[in-house]
Image (cartoon, rainbow, N blue to C red):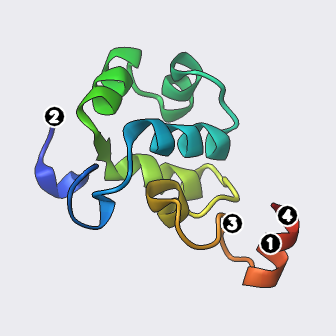
Amino acid sequence: MRDGNKDYHLGVGRLKDVTPDELFARLKLATSTTNITDLAAWLDWPVSRVRKAKKCGVIPVEWLGMLSRKKSPYAPGWVLTGEGSPFSGLPEAESEMLQ
């Protein structure tokens, strides 16, 4: 898709147990979108490239950076792995109350 240094490859290394469906579900939650078309618009990427990323299990690192830039309360690491607190910058106890 692009330079491997700028992508996360699902199914490899620490992401070996992360499926595209799981990651995209978290990504849609974090972006308040409900489908690929809305997600692509939020990311400002062509729908075809978002679909290809999901199909190939390759997630551009810049997508996670956009969560912070667009003020999503969700932690990029949680969106990527599903581990840890889903909320950025909140103490663990506070983030558990919001779930």
Pointer 1: what residue? Answer: 96
| Disc on the earlier residue, 4 or 3 | 3
Q: Is residue 87 left or right of residue 11?
A: right
Do tag 3 and tag 2 residues touch (Cβ < 8 Å)?
Answer: no
What residue is rendered at 38% in x and 19% in y?
46
Secondary structure of the residue carrying numbered label 4 = helix
Residues packed near mark 2 inside 10 Å, few (<14), some (14 to 19) or many (20 plus): few
Which image quadrant: the C terminus? bottom right
**Label 1 amino acid?**
Glu
Dot 1, crowdedness within 10 Å: few (<14), some or many (≥20)?
A: few
Residue appearing at x 22%, y 65% in the figure: 13
The tag earlier along the polypeptide, 3 or 1, is 3
What is the C-alpha distance between the residues marked 3 and 1?
9 Å
Amino acid type shown at disc 4:
Leu
How far apart in space, not on screen, are marks 1 and 4 (Cα)?
A: 5 Å
Q: State the residue position of label 4.
A: 98
